Image (tube, helix red, strand yellow):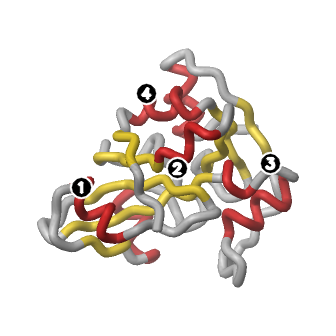
């Protein structure tokens, strides 16, 4: 398997991780959610799969939030933590030009630029969480504290 940017970053930081592959949906249009389907495909708990969502604030800042597949982001909590009045998800057609990743393959590691990153505190409930490796069909299994370190993320309560 060819290494992704996310894997190369973790290798450079000497952070241990495991790779898990699954059958990826090419349209990435799933009624029950891609993260839940990923959990089913890998036979892991859905709560340990963390989706990466990219937001734009009212001041045009790009921010990244990692949230468990079991939960939704509470917009009020997110605005408070980020320190802005409004946030909106980046449109799927903008994602590649902003992050270098496509929808369904967006990793909090290895984006074109380093954006402020926020990880929901439920990550600490697991010894390992699963994030996109930067390509559909490949997940990185990593200790949540190692991911926080690698992304220089803020750990916070973001759940609805």
Observer-side mark, 4 or 3, equals 4
Of pointers 4 and 2, the one earlier in the residue sequence: 2
Position above or below: 4 against 46: above
Say whether residue 15 is left or right of residue 56: right
According to the image, label 2 marks what residue?
107
Give the SS element for disc 1. helix
Q: Disc 2 to disc 1, how far (Cα)?
A: 19 Å
Observer-side mark, 4 or 2, equals 4
The picture quadrant where one finds residue 84 is bottom left
Of pointers 2 and 3, the one earlier in the residue sequence: 3
According to the image, label 3 marks what residue?
21
The N terminus is located in which quarter?
top right
Question: Residue 111: percent from the left, percent from the top?
Answer: 41, 47
Contact, mark 4 vs mark 2 (Cβ under 8 Å): no
Say whether residue 104 is left or right of residue 66: right
Labelled disc at residue 149: 4
């Amino acid at each position: 398997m060819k290494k992704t940017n996310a894997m190369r970053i973790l290798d450079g930081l000497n952070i241990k991780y495991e790779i898990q592959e699954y059958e990826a949906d090419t349209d990435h249009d799933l009624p029950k959610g891609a993260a839940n389907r990923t959990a089913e495909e890998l036979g892991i708990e859905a709560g340990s799969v963390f989706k990466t969502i990219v937001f734009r604030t009212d001041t045009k800042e790009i921010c990244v939030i990692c949230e468990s597949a079991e939960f939704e982001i509470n917009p009020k909590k997110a605005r408070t933590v980020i320190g802005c009045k409004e946030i909106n998800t980046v449109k799927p057609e903008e994602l590649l030009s902003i992050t270098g990743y496509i929808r369904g393959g967006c990793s909090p590691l290895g984006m074109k630029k380093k954006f402020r990153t926020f990880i929901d505190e439920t990550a600490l409930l697991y010894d390992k969480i699963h994030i996109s490796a930067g390509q559909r069909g490949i997940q990185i299994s990593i200790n949540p504290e190692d991911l926080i370190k690698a992304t220089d993320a803020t750990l916070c309560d973001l759940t609805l």
